[in-house]
Image (cartoon, helix red, strand yellow):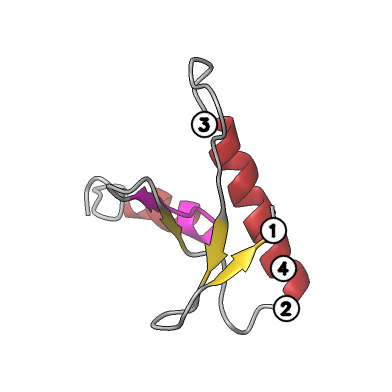
Amino acid sequence: SPRAGTVTQDVATAVKEYKAGKVEFRVDSGANVHCVVGKMSFDADKLTENIESLLTYVRSLKPSSSKGVYLRGVYLSATMMPSISVVI
């Protein structure tokens, strides 16, 4: 989609960004963040690194005017699988 930057006139730059690890995430109407953090073939260390990077980035987006808890919980799931709670 053009909004995600996957439809572009500058294909070379888009390919370079995605090969470098660009990840898009979405926030639904319930304020849930949806994002791919890895593949089933990744080892635990790589998944942990990706999740920590995502959490750090999401926390950095918190507006200074926002009060209270910004992240209440984290749940992981594979496609079409039940989720599991992650301690943050």
In the rendered view, does 37 fall on the left or right side of 34?
right
**Identity of the residue drawn at 32% across and 48% down:** 30
Of the numbered discs 1 and 3, the one sitting upstream in the chain is: 3
Kindly identify which residue carries mark 4. Answer: 46
Q: Closest to the observer: 30 or 58?
A: 30
- Residue at which label 1 appears: 87
Count residues near mark 1 (Cα–Cα under 10 Å), then give few for <14, some for 14-19, many for 20+.
few
Residue 18 at x, y = what percent? 47, 58
The kind of secondary structure element at disc 2 is loop
Label located before the other in sequence (2 or 3)? 2
Three-letter code, disc 2: Asp
Q: Residues within 10 Å of mark 2 (few under 14, many from 20)?
A: few
Amino acid type at circle 4 is Lys
Q: Secondary structure at mark 1?
A: loop
Q: Which residue is mark 2?
A: 43
Task: Specify the label residue 20 is tagged with.
Answer: none
